């Protein structure tokens, strides 16, 4: 290579090197920020917050450790094989036989015994983890029924007799039984910080036991591709003290508040006239549609659009006027309300505490 070209290449390498170092520094900085920031909603399976998630995470660490050790051993052997001194072609038959015996031992040890030991350990620990996950059953526990829809979660509390959506409250430190069903395609219920995934399969009820060690909000999501808005099929699990849970449950069992002022009353009229009632239920009113989420206590929920947007006036207004801007392909049709009608409907929705 001509000298000039080589020099150019070296300066190019140096520039690239500096860029790479800068990029790495930036990534580490962002990583530290993200790592240090106390996230409000816990969502990592590596930060387990319940007995089931802890057991799954232990299994994961064991597999990572064994996988890491195996990888290192294989890499060392590979390097050894690449760089060891070649046999002298003039060597005696005796030496060649010695080498072949040595190779056979290596194949039996490294190809059969070593993998068998590793796999047996992983298999044993997996069985132990599975036994632990199914051992959480407890009589008289809270039962929550979850029905997957494209793309939101219907949440029934059969013993308490009410339905809500996209937000699940549970008492902290108690195993809760989840019965999972679907109204359409296969979805998968996953709260990474609390448990592994379990599919919602048409025509079948799958059961999962879940417990949270600490009060807090835990991110849940759909983990099985189910259509265009699969990624926006989220929910939140709120773990709270027994007293707080009882208070929440009692409030959810109530019928919707009856409008008391003129604007809210007008909002209810818009709700009925626009046909919102065909798809949504508001308990205590004639609105009893079953296609969309139950809205009886809509304003008490943290999010809208199935865990995707904060439940505030701006997002609610956008959602009502054109839900497809926020979540393309969902079943709710756009509306064409006047400003005054929208104002009234927003007031009504915000009254549904
Ligand atoms: Cu439901 Cu993906």
Image (spheres, rainbow, N blue to C red):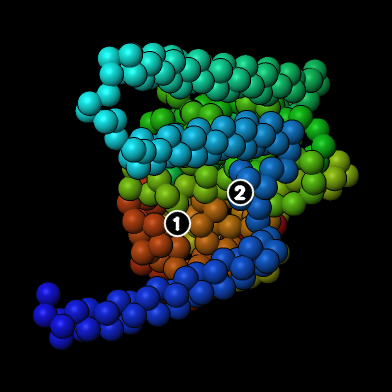
Q: Quadrant of the N terminus?
A: bottom left
Q: Residue 44's mark? A: 2
The x and y percentages for residue 89 are 22, 28
Read off the residue under disc 1.
273
Q: Quadrant of the C terminus?
A: bottom right
Q: Does 196 sit left or right of 353 as displayed?
A: left
Name the foreground residue: 51 vs 25.
25
> Residue 50 falls in which quadrant of the image?
top right
Q: Residue at x 82, y 37 (%)?
A: 173
Compared with residue 148, is residue 338 higher up or lower down, i.e. above or below?
Answer: below
Q: Which residue corresponds to the image point at 73% horizontal and 18% vertical from the top-left?
A: 135
Dot 2: element? loop
Element under label 1? helix
- Examine the rendering and report whether any part of residue 105 can be seen: yes
Circle 1 or circle 2, nearest the eye? 2
Callouts 1 and 2 close, C-beta under 8 Å? no
């Amino acid at each position: 290579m001509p000298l000039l070209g080589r020099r150019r290449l070296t300066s190019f390498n140096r520039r690239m090197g500096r860029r790479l170092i800068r990029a790495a520094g930036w990534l580490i900085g962002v990583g530290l920020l993200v790592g240090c920031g106390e996230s409000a909603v816990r969502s990592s399976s590596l930060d387990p917050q319940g007995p089931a998630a802890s057991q799954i995470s232990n299994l994961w660490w064991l597999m990572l450790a064994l996988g890491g050790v195996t990888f290192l051993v294989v890499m060392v052997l590979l390097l050894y094989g690449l760089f060891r001194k070649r046999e002298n072609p003039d060597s005696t038959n005796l030496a060649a036989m010695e080498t072949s015996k040595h190779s056979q031992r290596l194949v039996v040890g490294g190809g059969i015994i070593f993998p068998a030991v590793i796999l047996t350990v992983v298999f044993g620990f997996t069985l132990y983890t599975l036994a632990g996950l199914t051992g959480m059953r407890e009589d008289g526990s809270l039962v929550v029924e979850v029905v997957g829809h494209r793309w939101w979660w219907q949440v029934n509390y059969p013993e308490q007799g009410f339905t809500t959506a996209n937000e699940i409250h549970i008492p902290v430190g108690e195993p809760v039984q989840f019965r999972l069903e679907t109204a359409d395609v296969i979805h998968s219920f996953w709260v990474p910080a609390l448990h592994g995934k379990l599919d919602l399969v048409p025509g079948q009820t799958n059961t999962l036991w879940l417990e949270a060690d600490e009060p807090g909000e835990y991110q849940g999501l759909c983990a099985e591709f189910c259509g265009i808005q699969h990624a926006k099929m989220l929910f939140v699990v709120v773990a709270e003290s027994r007293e707080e849970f009882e208070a929440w449950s009692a409030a959810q069992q109530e019928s919707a508040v009856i409008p008391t002022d003129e604007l809210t009353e007008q909002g209810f009229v818009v709700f009925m006239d626009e046909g919102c009632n065909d798809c949504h239920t508001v308990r205590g009113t004639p609105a009893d549609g079953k296609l969309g989420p139950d809205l009886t206590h809509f304003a008490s929920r943290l999010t809208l659009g199935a865990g995707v947007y904060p439940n505030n006036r701006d997002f609610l207004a956008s959602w009502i006027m054109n839900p497809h801007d926020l979540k393309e392909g969902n079943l709710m049709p756009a509306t064409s309300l006047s400003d005054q009608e929208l104002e009234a409907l927003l007031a009504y929705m915000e009254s549904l505490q």
